[in-house]
Image (cartoon, grey):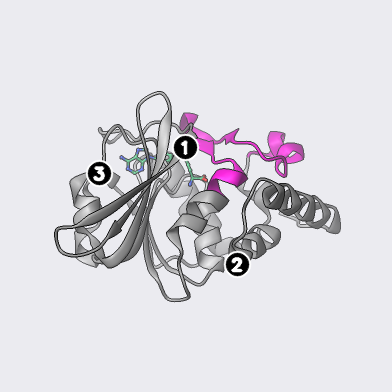
Amino acid sequence: MRDTTKHQGLRNRLVNVLIKKGITDKKVLQAIKKIPRHLFMDSSFIDFAYQDKAFPILADQTISQPYTVAFQTQLLAIVPKSKVLEIGTGSGYQTAVLLEMKAKVFSIERQQELFKKTKLFLPKLGYKPKALIFGDGYIGLKDEAPFDGIIVTAGAPFVPKPLLSQLKIGGRLVIPVGDKVQIMTLFIRKSEKEFEKHEFGDFRFVPMLKEKN
Ligand code: SAH
């Protein structure tokens, strides 16, 4: 597990690509500049780690494209100590971005293989989420609710009601909604019953799955 000046150089280039594509949040860009994405990927893909692309990881899942990670994180608009729930831990890369931004992170993964791998891996890089949970993101995490932010990193066929109800007033849910193609959607909780909805165009994710292994 090595991070070298070559990797850092590639990350600086990646950050410039993200700026050109419209990412403006300095804290998000700083996190991406710092995190050794190549270490979150299977070794055969290491040379591709700093291209702005998604790649396969364990269990037929993918590590999200850096632009997608940056875009979703920017929409989440977190500040230090924000309490954040992530659905779809996957490789843990998005988790690391949230932790670099000093959020308190709870993350749920439904593939046991990935859950186990990432739970061992993140602490090796010094990343300490509040909790990694093996479970079903459709039900959220009632015991720790409410959250300042909830980020879903798999394509949701519909918006799970528990996720909306687990937001603080003023809290934000960032969720790609749709079957084959997903529309990036932001919900802001305005009151107990009112949610503001904003849509941000098409993205492609692996599907959010219902049954557990
Ligand atoms: N943030 C991750 C993205 C991984 S892809 C990364 O950048 O690496 C989406 C992840 O969501 C997969 O790991 C998949 O197993 C997980 N997932 C799918 N359905 C889920 C569900 N119902 N609950 C929790 N996680 C789920």
Q: Nearer the viewer, residue 74 or 118?
A: 74
* Circle 2 SS class: helix
Q: Check contact, mark 3 vs mark 2: CB within 8 A.
A: no
Q: Which residue is depicted at the point 47% across and 73% down? A: 79
Q: Which residue is depicted at the point 23% across and 65% down? A: 145
The amino acid sitting under disc 3 is: Tyr
Q: x, y percentage for residue 196?
A: 28, 54
Q: x, y percentage for residue 87?
A: 36, 49
Residue 199 seen in render: yes
Q: Is residue 152 magenta?
A: no
Depicted 116 relative to depicted 145: above or below: above
Q: Which residue is mark 1?
A: 201
Q: Is residue 57 left or right of residue 149?
A: right
| Residue stretch rendered in magenta on the structure | 42-69
Q: Which residue is depicted at the point 71% across and 48% down? A: 20
Look at discs 3 and 2 and give the one toward the viewer: 2
Q: Which residue is mark 3?
A: 138
The amino acid sitting under disc 1 is: Gly
